[in-house]
Image (cartoon, coloured by chain):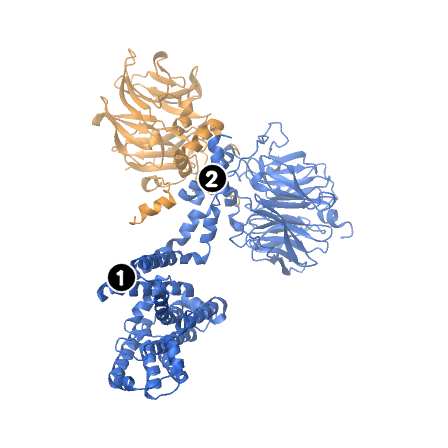
Amino acid sequence: MTFHERLQAWRYNLVPDHIIGEILTKRWTDNAIPFLALLVTIGVFGTAIPGFFEPFSLLESTRQLGEFLIVVIGLTVVMLAGGIDLAVGSIFALAAFAAVAVFFIFELPTGVALLASIATGAVFGAINGYLIGYLRLRAFLTTLVTLVIGRAIYDILIVNYGSLIQMSSASSDVWDFIGDGAFSGFSVPVISALVLAVVAHVALTRSRPGWHILAVGGSRRSAHNSGIKVRQTVFMSYVISGLCAGFAGFLIACRLSGAGPGTGLNMEILAITAAVVGGNSLGGGRGSVAKSIMGAIIVLVMNNGLIRLGYGTGTNQMVLGIMLAAAVILDIRWLKNRHKVLNELYVAPIYHRMGETQSAVPDSGTPYALNNRIAHTEYIGLGELEGPEDVVLDKDDHLYCGTRHGEIVRFFAPDYKRSEIFAHTGGFPLGLAIDKDSNILSCVGAMGLYRISQKGEVKQLSAETNRSYTSIVDDARLRDPNDLDIAPDGKIYFTDSTTRYDAHDWAIDSIEGRPTGRLLVFDPATGETRTLLDNYRYANGVCMAHDGKSLFFAESWACRVHRYWLEGPKAGTAECVIKDMPGYPDNINRASDGNYWMAWLGMRTPSFDLALRHPGFRKRMSRRLPQDEWLFPNINTGGVVKFAGDGRIVETMGDLTGNSHPMVTSMREHKGYLYVGGILNNRIGRYKLENADPAWTGPRSYWGART
Amino acid sequence: MSLLDPLLDLFRGKAVTIPPMDGALRPNTLLDDSEVVIAALEPDNLAVLNGKLIYSSGTDVRQVSPRKTIGTFASPVTALAVSDAGALAVGLDDGTLLVGGKEIAGFNCITALAFHKDTLYVCNGSAGLAPSQWASDLMHRNTSGSVWQVDPATGNRRQLASGLAYAYGLVIDASAGRIVVSESWAHRLVSIPLSGGRATEVLPRLPAYPARITASETGYLLSLFAPLNRLVEFVLQEPDYRADMMREIDSRFWIAPSLSPSHSFLEPLQNGGVRSMGVHKPWSPTRSYGLVAELDHDFQPQASYHSRANGRFHGVTSALMLDGAIIAAAKGGNHIVRVAAAGGT
């Protein structure tokens, strides 16, 4: 290995590039930009304003922040439901007036003042909600009207009753504490805001009404079609917003012990800016409370910071406007381009040097030399079938295979001309096996391990295993369950080929070459699935040895076959029995002569082997070329290989014409014939074997003569 | 292109793109549906000698009808031309140039020959490599091709242009006083003054590598021997991989253009070329293709004849108009075929 190559190996195998792509699949990455903006804002104003971080200053700032945050959370709920609430400012002001009037003019207790504020908010919210939700008026115009009318009412009231309030001598400790006091540095508004934030977050992300709000905002029509009461949900969102604004109004009333002409003025602009700058989508459906908190802090710090630095109202408004515009543009660009960024960054190849292999070229004299023996098979289901990844035959000679439409098709013996859809799984059935009760077991791509009874009832056995501690994407989920076999004790051993790609993207996994394949076991007694082995380059076919004491499994992209011991001194360990093959192994099954059949899904090419030693080349390829143009292993030529339990290669068959079986993913011997399937083929091939036991069948080999 | 693009390019790298086959070059199956003239092993350069169609194949020059071998040479024949007087000029892979059987000059990469008024014009594809090593020339990104004027009587020669990215075909446009040359690796046609000088672009951005050009009644016929392929273009931007590939891998299995459809499972495969449900998609990315283009008198494409990714008659290196029909030699498809001219108007 040259020094340059060694550098490449270090660079690409030690730096976990794949983490970037995996993190980007997480929705919380939407918060990255607002979070950065938050840090910058606090950093800039924290250094520019002397005493910014002093406790008293923080306490006063956070008091105001608490009130503001409550309003913003309410507005967020409306925006998530796809609406907008411009009336929050005037509701806030009216609620503040209501509290002040009840407390100072009618001299009632603080609790009543609180109720009055909340009721004011609820009434105005309900008016908005009724007009927008039930009468289906436009949210923007409707709340603009409520904003103007609410403000007018407030101005009239404050002119007429302002002096009464100022002359009142009412006082209360509770009122004063809410306005001035603090529990060990946390004022009442801050505590209320935090409680509300937690409640709102849990409600939005974990509760049925919260999901309804997000669904309505995401797509009204789909929400309606799935039975959500859209109008009621919209109505409720405005009521919630009104309640929040009302409660915030009560808090400011306590803090200022009064209400003036400036209360709540322009608050709607600040609140909307905060929600949008935090990353909540104006279009609805996308956003969170966390985003709103970030947005609220950014806006408030900037607003107050600019005032304290001596800039006028004009500058302030200008900055807010620019922030709003930037946030809206970023939001749209991010929404539009996120999946593109993800597509380009997800493939993170690593360095891998394939071992020298023997040639598979015809007449090369090696045991792997390909030929044209399976080029002329008898076709089953030609033109009807699409994607029989695996084939299996039962004790009555009927033939089963999966299709890419999610079905398991049964062809009837003896001529296999007639077929029926045996079961519908909904995923892509890959590996198949028959248990001792004649149930069909299948690894269904992207779904899990399933059992189909002879009556065609589909039952999920397993869809998850234990999660590893360091995974970013959820690797408990079975992403690409591929092949299985059943031990004599009934335990089901199966592979999950990769945790990086979904089942239909299986070939892309070869470009990346990251070993994430696993061998799993499902125990029917406990119903639990465990991971036995991890870190294989596309774990694929599984086959129980004839004696049932060990199993073979294929590691496709490494061109290796391993043996995993179930019993004996090596129990629980795996050893490599065949390495450095010239083809990529797929399913493995028993042969009648005590050997094993292995399918080759494709052939190694010198150019691809070389590319595996150039991870940077593959990485750039995945970014600069569309997927159709990527270099692939040669999966247009496959084959069938027979090997002995000790790893010796007995014989190899192929179809170099590519007309019948270009890619072979499975083969099953049954009564002297070999049945050949391919995941990208549109037929099953039936090939007459010479020197095979004409009575041998798989079910009998596994479960004895009684079945 | 938005303002942010240059900035984002840092993160996403530059997409590798190629010109589309569109307009007059829109794909069809005319070449695949054509009539077979003769099956021959790697038929290369076509010419007309005494009114009869001749072609080169390996070390032979053969006549189509009646079938006979006109000459056999020490090295594979790489170019043919017939003078107005009926003299046959032959270029060989070892660089020998023969006129009327007499060796008159030595080059190293004779890819095309043409007579004009008893003067012979020669395309020397590369300064260091033989025509059979063309893939290597491309992978080295050489631009060492040249065009020469040779006096067949004396063997005196003069270089008209140099620094061409594989000159692989030429035709004399006497009315405009210029020679139009195929510059394969630059996928374009360029023109050179008859007296020599700088090359100027005539037809840029071809979607395939141009080979020989012949004159016809309506203009010219251009053969294009392999398609541009985005993966190959990408490999050309990757010096490390390319160097290792050239050092370690047999040139038959390179990621490089090819004359013939895939022969071996050791050849590279692209995702789009995977056979699915028994179908090889004709529009899939491919390293070999069959393409003949009809050009007008201004060298603008008017019509085209294709053998697509799933077709047979790939690697057309030579085509000429004979009795109102187009005769094309599919070197990679091992056939000479005849197709009625669509009539480049």
Q: Earlier in the sequence, mark 1 or mark 2?
A: 2
Q: Which label was assigned to residue A689?
A: none
Q: Name the spot of residue A379 as percent of width and height, x first.
A: 60, 44
Marks 1/2 same chain:
yes
> What amino acid is at disc 1?
Val
Q: Quick check: A461 left or right of A248?
A: right
How many labels were placed on the picture? 2
**Residue A421 drawn above or below residue B45:** below
Which chain: orange? B
Does dot 1 land on a helix, a strand or a loop? helix
> What amino acid is at disc 2?
Arg
Q: Nearer the viewer, residue A205 or B229?
A: A205
Q: Are marks 1 and 2 in contact (CB under 8 Å)?
A: no
Which chain: blue? A
| Residue B151 visible at all | yes
Does dot 2 land on a helix, a strand or a loop? helix
Which quadrant holds residue A313? bottom left
**Residue beneath disc 1:** A319
Q: Name the spot of residue A298 as percent of width and height, x first.
A: 34, 62
| Residue A399 visible at all | no
Q: Nearer the viewer, residue A96 or B188?
A: A96
**Residue beneath disc 2:** A11
**Residue A274 drawn above or below residue A25:** below
Q: Name the spot of residue A133 as percent of width and height, x first.
A: 38, 75
